[in-house]
Image: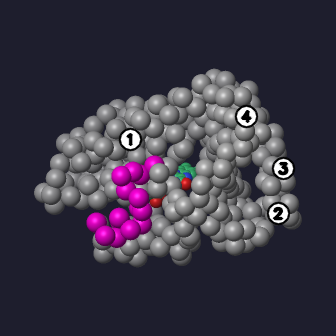
Amino acid sequence: MSIFERPVHDCIETLSEEYGIYLKPTSHIQSMEIFSKNEKAVIEGPLGFTNIRGREQDSFDSQLARQTKSTIHYHSEYTYEELLSKHSHVVMATGDGEYAKKTKNYREDLTVTIKGAIIEGSFDPYLVKAWLNYDIAPFGYCYFIPLSDHEANISLAIPDLPENANVNLDSLWDLFYEKVRAEFNQKIRITDQFQITRYPMGICRSARIGNTFYVGNCFGTMMPFMGFGQYASILSGVYAAYDLCGLGKYEELMKPLRRSYEDSLILRRSMEQLSNKKIGSNRSCDAK
Ligand SMILES: Cc1cc2nc3c(=O)[nH]c(=O)nc-3n(C[C@H](O)[C@H](O)[C@H](O)COP(=O)(O)OP(=O)(O)OC[C@H]3O[C@@H](n4cnc5c(N)ncnc54)[C@H](O)[C@@H]3O)c2cc1C
């Protein structure tokens, strides 16, 4: 969602124009429907992009792998400590805060639990949907993101707050799945499912310690408000490379992303003060 990357308006364009990284998204997002318990808002315009992650041929991961000239060592079993003793610099980019935490350079602010599925049906690839309904996802959200005109990802994410200690994720999922089915009013089939429990969100205390660069989620590029982090993660990789090439100081270059993280954390904490009553207005909103 471009709105989270201001002043940048088009992440894909900026990555190619400014940094020479060419990514082909699955689709652009032209319309977003947001549902509260009783209301619906529609936002239209060039809102961002959808993309696939993982091992698929068209995923961002595969696209980046094809563009890199360096050798990728799969199934590496080196520890950080072993790499540190063997190489002049280490870029820590393992995708979550665990290693940064182990090196005592991480402030964990929250953890989230996510349940998701791939569904089959007939979808508009340019339209995404989100639910801010605390009956289904208390203090969190649900979303629908099409992967094509016949496949989509649906997910439910809730923060692991004390208030959520007794919620039954499977029951929430059933409610959400019912909403999705009602929304599309067509035969929908789940083809794959996943669950991530207690995924840590936080930020490192120092972007660089000695010759180790904390990059991506090891830095804290996943923004706590809605869990977005791909663009900031790529940017952090570019900034680490700039520092290695003597083109800038990583800690300095990362300052705007650190600020974004802290701002996003404030939005997340505000969400935790809300209720269904405060989220839904008493009239329909059509924000074109
Ligand atoms: C369910 C979910 C949904 C999300 N949705 C969005 C979204 O809609 N939009 C958005 O912008 N962001 C989203 N994010 C956040 C985004 O995916 C991350 O912020 C971003 O991918 C972080 O990039 P990264 O490079 O730090 O980690 P990753 O993209 O996770 O990459 C880390 C890589 O390191 C590899 N690795 C791990 N350990 C080692 C090791 N010891 N040695 C070598 N390699 C290792 C992993 O296999 C992986 O390939 C989502 C995250 C999750 C979990």
Q: Which amino acid does the dot numbered 3 rest on?
A: Glu
Mark 3–mark 4 Cα distance, whole angstroms, equals 24 Å
Q: Which residue is mark 2?
A: 188
Q: Secondary structure at mark 1?
A: helix
Is residue 182 at least partly visible in the picture? yes
Question: What colour scheme governs how the chains and residues are painted in the rendered image of this protein?
Answer: one colour
Closer to viewer: mark 2 or mark 1: 1
Q: Residues within 10 Å of mark 4 (few under 14, many from 20)?
A: few
Q: Which residue is mark 4?
A: 282
Confirm or deny contact between disc 3 and disc 1 (CB under 8 A): no
Q: Which amino acid does the dot numbered 4 rest on?
A: Asn
Please tell me which residue is depicted at 71% across the width and 31% down the height of the picture.
276
Relative to 57, say whether 49 is above or below: above
Relative to 64, say whether 48 is above or below: above
Q: Secondary structure at mark 3?
A: helix
Closer to viewer: mark 2 or mark 4: 4
Relative to 32, say whether 141 is above or below: above
**As rendered, which of 113 and 44 lies closer to the eye?**
44
Where is residue 102 drawn, in percent x and y? 39, 36
The answer to whether residue 36 is left or right of residue 16 is right
Q: Which residue is mark 1?
A: 260
